[in-house]
Amino acid sequence: MTTVLECRGLTSGYIRQSPCVRDVDLTLESGEITCLLGPNGAGKTTLLMTLAGLLPRVSGEIRVDDHPIGSGRPREAVRAGMVLVPDDRALFRQLTTKQNLQLAMNERSRRRAGIREVLEYFPSLEKRLTVDAGRLSGGEQQMLAIGRAILQRPKVLVIDELSMGLAPVIVNEILDVLRTLAREAGMSVLLVEQHVHLALGVADKAAVLVHGRVVDTDTAVALRDDPGRVERAYLGENSDSLETHRAESR
């Protein structure tokens, strides 16, 4: 595996003098799913917006495939291979499903299967191609948002609040697709998910963000096998757990 995304010392926030993400280090590998866990208000969405260039950073460095990404430059981030699916899905609600997908297609998409490839991942969208995105169900909208991201050929696919408002059967279907994308396409997936057990069940690695800082990181299996570890991180009882874990593993 190779490192696809690396950020070092990342600090950002909506008010420059009062950042809500502080000194975050994060590394994503190709072919892996990483889940970002943390309580409400921990700074997870702020971190994703900063990675995608939609929010300028105060300090720190972001690199995709060792290519530095400038602060607050979303086009540069997309060109480098990072695509964000935001929690509101950001669909063009008055355009059809097909039109939303067509807008996302680039030259690499056209050379390959294009929309047909998306329908292979999400076959339930085929009968909804002529339906306005605003009239789709929540699950169909999430599938469309992820399908649109797939067409941009990301190296890093970033998804905020994947399961929010969705039925479990739909969530499992989408997670199966993400596993396939990571395994077969070598895509790196960064997933923010409130349901801890769900996230740890699909991810390879996990990081816990509390009060804007990464307080713990490990394999998903290690965190899943120690249910109290995430809870302690959320409650602030193991703020030094990351350094302790690193020291013990040396």
Image (spheres, rainbow, N blue to C red):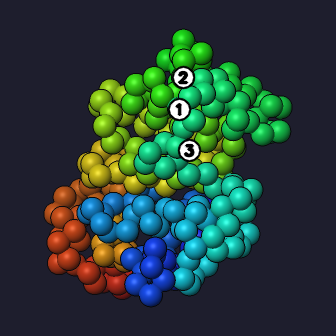
| Residue depth check, mark 1 versus mark 3: number of the one nearer the observer | 1
Residue that carries the numbered disc 3 in the rendered image: 182
Tell me the element at label 1. loop
N-term mark: 3 or 2:
2
Foreground of the two, 154 or 144: 144
Q: Circle 3: is it few (<14), some (14-19), or many (20+) Cα within 10 Å? A: some
Tell me the element at label 3. helix
Q: CA distance from mark 2 to mark 1?
A: 6 Å
Q: Residue at x 38, y 81 (%)?
A: 246
Instruction: Point out residue 127 in the picture as x, y percentages from the top left corner.
Output: 54, 12
Foreground of the two, 147 or 217: 147
- Which amino acid type is marked by label 1? Arg
Q: Quadrant of the C terminus?
A: bottom left
Instruction: Point out residue 96 in the picture as x, y percentages from the top left corner.
Output: 60, 23
Residue 129 relative to residue 25: left or right: right
Residue that carries the numbered disc 1 in the rendered image: 93
